[in-house]
Image (cartoon, rainbow, N blue to C red):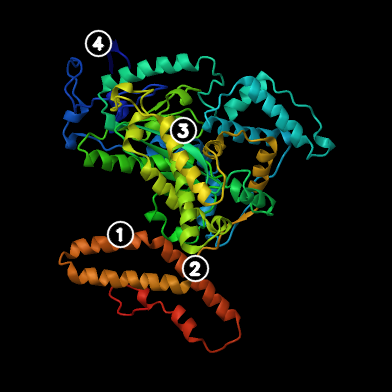
Amino acid sequence: MLFAVNGENQGVAYEILRSTLGERALFPHIATKNCSFKVNFGAEDPWFTPLTRYTYVGHISLQGRVLGGQGPATREEAEAVMAIARDEHLSLSTVSTINKDEKLIGDAVKAPALIHSTIITKKRTGPLEEMEQLLVTWMEDQIQKCMPLSLLTIQAKAHLLFEELKKHYDDTHNKNFVASRGWFHRFKTHHNFHSVNFSSDTASAEAAKFKDIFLKFILNEGYLPGQIFNVDKTGLYWKRMPEWSYIHKEAKTMPKLKTFKDRLTLLLGGNVTGYKLKPFMIYHSAKLGSLAKGKHTLHVHYRHNKKAQMTALLFEDWFMHCFIPEVKDYCRENSIPFKILLVLDSAPCYPQHIGDINKNVKVVFLPSNTTSLIQPMNQGALAMFKAYYLQNMFSQAVEAKDNEDKELRTFWEEFSVLNAILNIGRAWKEVTKECMNGIWKNLLKMYVNSIKGFDKDGAVVEINKKIVSLGKCLDLELEEEDIRKLIDVQDVELKAEDLIEFAEEEEEIEEEPEQMFTIKAMAEAFASIEHGMKLFSKMDVNLEQFAEVERGVRDVLACYRVIYEKRKKRAVQANMALPSRELTAEEERIDEPAALSSPSSSSDI
C-alpha cells in the first residue's frame, strides 16, 4: 500500500501478502481529532494527479465491489457522542445522560407504562449545594436583564446566600464558606456559564470591535437583510399593578395568591427588514383550561416548565420546531435563499452547538456584557411591546367598567393567563415594522431605512401617556414614572428571600395527571380510524398504494394498540376475580373487539 500527500508519492506504507487476505476486502478508515475532513471516492474530479495504477473506488463496477459488514453492535463501537448529538439534534448532555442510564432506560422500555406517577425533586443536601443552585438562578436573571456581572458581585452574592441558608440547617452544617477564585472557577465550569467574562469594563470597546467584524462577515458571506435575525428572551409580570395601588396591596395579603409576582418568559425577535417572529412563551402551567384545547391556534408557541424560564432544551425545541420552519416559509414567500444568520447573546440557556443543527442556519454570539449596547431587541422593541401590553390591559379594564359596570378589582381577579396570551398577541402585532428595523441601528446602521432612525424613548413615552390617561378613567392617579417602573420591573434584582421562596416552590411534590386512556375511548378511536380506512379503500383504485398506507397507519398506531390490549387484559382479569354477575350494557360495549380486527370488519362501535 502506497501513501501520497497532495499527490506526491511517499513510498510504501504497508506490505500485505494477497494470500493472507483471502476473500476479505480492505475498507478505508480515518481517525481524526478536533478536525473535519472531506473524502473523494471518485464522485468529483481528481484533486491531485492519482498514483500510477490507482483506481477510485467509485469507478469500480458494482459487481467488482464487496459489501461492507454490519454497523456497530454496541454503544462503545458507535460514533462519538458529539456526532450522535449533531445527527439526532440533541444536546451533548442529553446524549451523555442517555448513555449513562442505558440499562435503566432499557428496563423502563420493557416494563409496562405507568399510568400514574409522582415526581419528587432532589431534596436539599446542604447549604453550599443549595446556595449554588440559587446563585445560578440569580445570575441567569441578571444576564437576562442585561445587568453587568463581576467576580466581586458574584462572590458577595454567594456569601450572602450561604449565610442566609445556614439559618435553615442544624449545627451539622456549620462550616464556613469562602467564595474563592478556585470555587468560582469550578462553579462557572460546572454550571456552563460559557463565554461570560463577568466584566463590563471593556464592553464598549468589545462592542465596537464586534460590529466591524460582524459587518465584514455579512458582506463577505452575502447575507441579505431579510436573512439576518435576532431574538431575545424577556420576563413579563402579566398581572402586575402599581405597587402603591390598593389592588397590589390586597394581593400581597392574600394567602397563596401572589399573582402580582406571577411571571412568564417570552422569546421575541425578528429580522432586519422588520419581520416579526411568532412569540415563544414559557409558563409554569401545563393545564390552562380552554387554552389547552386551542394551544395550536394561539398567537404564541406555548411551552411550560416549573420555573417558567428558558432552558437549553426549550431553546433547542424552539430552534428546530418553531424558528426553522417559520424562516423557511418566510424565505420561500419572499423568494430569497434559505440562508439564515441568527444573532444571540451569551446567555447560558443558548447552547453553543445550536449552530450545528442546520447547515443553512448560522448562529453568531454577541460578546459578553454588550447586549445592552448592540443587541437589537434591547434597543426599544421589548420596551415598546411591554408598553403596548399594559395599554391593552388598561384599555380592557376601562371597557369592562363602561360596558359591564365592572370594578377594577373584579376585572383584575378575572384576568387570566389566557387573557394575557391574547394581549401578548395584540401587543406584539402593534410593534411596528419601523421599530423592528430601527432597533438594528447600533449593530447594522447601513440597513436601517429611516433617515431619522427609531426614537425608542419617544415612542414609549407616547404610549405611557395614553396609559396614564386610561388610569384616570379607572380612578388610578398614575404618573409616567409608575408606568416606567411597571415596564422595567424585571430590572429589579432578586433578593435572597425571593430566590429561597422560588426554590421552595419548586421542591413541592408534583403529581402528573393520569393519562386519559380508557378502553371505551380507545375502542371508539380505533373504530373511527378503521371506518376512515374503509372509505379510502373504496376510493383508491391503486390497491398497492392503499396497502402501503394501511401498513403505515397500523405501524404508527402500534403503541396505542399495545396499551389498549393491556387495558382490556386487566379489565378481564378484574372481572374474573369478582363474583359472577350479569354484565351491564356499558361493560358489554367496552369488551367488543370486533372493530379492531381488520379493515374488512363490518362492525362499528
Circle 3: element type = loop
What amino acid is found at the position of numbered circle 1 in the picture? Gly
67 in relation to 220, above or below: below
User: In the rendered image, which quarter contains the C terminus?
Assistant: bottom left
* Residue at the image position 71 percent from the left and 32 percent from the top: 161
Whether residue 390 is visible here, answered yes or no, is no
Give the label, 4 or 1, closer to the camera: 1
Q: How far apart are marks 3 and 1 (CA)?
A: 36 Å
> Mark 1 = which residue?
552
Residue 598 spot, x, y in % from top left: 32, 72
> Mark 2 = which residue?
566
> Mark 3 = which residue?
351
Circle 4: element type = strand
400 in relation to 505, above or below: below
> Mark 4 = which residue?
9
Residue 93 spot, x, y in % from top left: 51, 36
What is the crowding at mark 4: few (fewer than 14 residues within 10 Å), some, or many (at least 20)? Answer: few
Of 425 and 298, nearer the camera is: 425
Taking 305 as reference, is 249 left or right? right
User: In the rendered image, which quarter contains the N terminus?
Assistant: top left
Taking 386 as reference, is 241 left or right? right
Residue 319 spot, x, y in % from top left: 39, 39
Q: Earlier in the sequence, mark 3 or mark 1?
A: 3
